[in-house]
Amino acid sequence: MRTTDRILELECSPTTQTLSQRLVSGFATLASVLRVFRNRMEINALRDLDDNQLKDIGLTRADLNSAFLASTFFEDPSDQLTRSARNRGRNSIHRTHEE
């Protein structure tokens, strides 16, 4: 019986990113930060609407306040507002079907 020694060489050193990979990663991060700031400015503009206009898009003033309070400075509060509006829309549809 013949045995053969096999050596498995693993590359354990951390891989370095190429310049283009670092640029893409940097631009993606920058785009994400800019999107968060843009969405925050748009949500601030929603504060200028009256209660009836907010109701038309499925939001309340309490939704705006809670979205800002629940998110940190670098988090996007628009996700929470979208969920609130969708939930309110679903609930109103269910109520109209029950009547």
Image (cartoon, grey):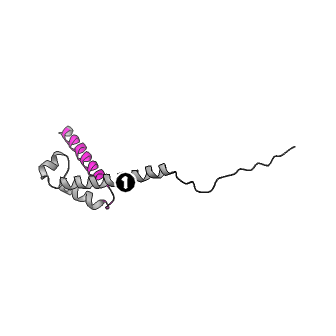
Which sits in the foreground, 42 or 21? 21
Which sits in the foreground, 72 or 30? 30
The part of the chain drawn in magenta is 71-96
Q: Type of residue at label 1?
A: Leu
Q: Position of residue 7 (x, y in %)?
A: 74, 50
Q: Where is residue 96 in the image (x, y as percent from the top left)?
A: 18, 39
Q: Position of residue 14 (x, y in %)?
A: 58, 56
Residue 49 appears in the rendering: yes
Residue drawn at x 66%, y 52% is 10
Which sits in the foreground, 68 or 12? 12
Q: At numbered mark 1, what does the secondary structure look like: helix, strand or loop?
A: helix
Q: Does the magenta stretch include residue 90?
A: yes
Residue drawn at x 16%, y 45% is 56
Q: How crowded is mark 1: few (under 14 residues within 10 Å), some or many (20 or more)?
A: few
Q: Mark 1 points at which residue?
A: 30
Is 85 positioned to the left or the right of 26 in the image? left
Is 72 positioned to the left or the right of 45 in the image? right
State the residue lying farthest toward the right: 1
- The C terminus lies in quadrant: top left
Residue 63 appears in the rendering: no
Residue drawn at x 20%, y 47% is 58
Q: Where is residue 92 in the image (x, y as percent from the top left)?
A: 20, 43
State the residue lying farthest toward the front: 19
